[in-house]
Image (cartoon, grey):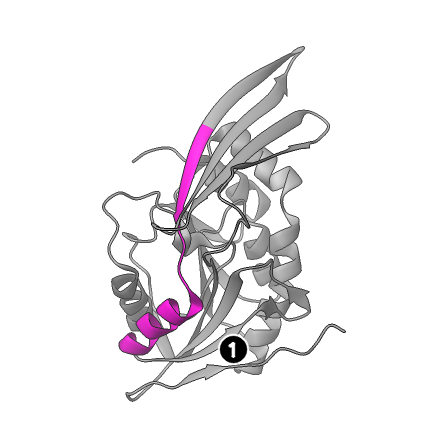
Amino acid sequence: MNEWYRKDLAYIHDIGFRSYVLQAIPGILAILKQHGIQDGLIVDLGCGSGLSAEELVRAGYRVLGVDISAAMIEIARCRVPLAEFQVESFFKVEIPNCSAVISIGECFNYLFDPDHATLTQVFQHIYDALVPGGIFIFDIAEPGQLSCATPVKSFTEGEDWIVLVEKKEDPDQHILTRRIITFRQVGNNYRRDDEVHCQRLYTAAEISTMLQQVGYQVEIHRCYGQFPLPNAHATFVARKSTSKPSLFRVVPEASNE
């Protein structure tokens, strides 16, 4: 298995890029309550450094977190000793019977696993693991992440780190490529590391079709509760149906004006 989100990038992501998860999780907790899921096991796919797991445990749920990054899981285990964590691709992990599955941060877009199954197969695997009435909550990145074909470069810095990112979108192949260069202070020096992350961009309609084929009842949102998603992102609330065909419903969002 290739290494992704290695030690320095995992540290930087946990320290400097935690706001997305922390703003999303209150909306996810509200969705769980709305669907009558007050307790039970929540499987967190692409759990990262355990920020969402910490909030789920605090709310009274049992949590199994899964992430392909060993460095992320190391942080998560220290942060949330009451949760269970596993280093694995969510295309391969065995998902136990659970009340809900969540995945925050466009995890299903990533092309980390070269032998990954189709998303429909993964969605079926999750469906089979959910208890009747169980909920699958996740978000994706859609085409249109960048407004032009020219690569976009940016940098972010913290007290002991700097991260440089170059993003490029292939509008024909619907592939977003992020070249990530990190510098982390070690003693008096800075250590450099490089990673390249590729994502397959899906439209919300594509994903909803896959979910319907499996048998989910689907809602599409553009936010997690009060937290609006970035441009060209969608959130899905997919409920396990006890009979087919499943229903598809787009939920209009309240205007921010």
Image coordinates for residue 147, horizontal then vertical, percent: 55, 50
Location of residue 22 (image quadrant): bottom right
For residue 109, above or below residue 213: above
Q: Which residues are magenta?
A: 195-214
Image coordinates for residue 255, horizontal then vertical, percent: 70, 76
Magenta-span inclusion, residue 209: yes
Magenta-span inclusion, residue 85: no
Position of the N terminus by quadrant: top left
* Residue 58 visible here: no
Location of residue 12 (image quadrant): top right
Q: How many neighbours does mark 1 have within 10 angstroms: few (below 14), some (14-19), or many (20 or more)?
A: some
> Residue at the location (33% across, 47% down)?
89
Which of the two residues, 205 or 224, is positioned nearer the viewer here?
A: 205
Q: Which residue is mark 1?
A: 37
Q: Is residue 16 left or right of residue 140?
A: right
* Residue 117 visible here: yes
Name of the residue lying farthest toward the right: 257
> Residue at the location (49% across, 23% down)?
193
The amino acid marked with disc number 1 is Ile
User: Which element carries disc 1, helix, strand or loop?
Assistant: loop
Which of the two residues, 239 or 139, is positioned nearer the viewer here?
A: 139
For residue 8, above or below residue 124: above
Q: Is residue 65 left or right of residue 116?
A: right
Image coordinates for residue 132, horizontal then vertical, percent: 36, 82
> Residue at the location (57% across, 75% down)?
31
Figure label count: 1
Position of the C terminus by quadrant: bottom right
Image coordinates for residue 219, horizontal then vertical, percent: 48, 78
Q: Is residue 8 left or right of residue 19?
A: left
For residue 150, above or below residue 225: above
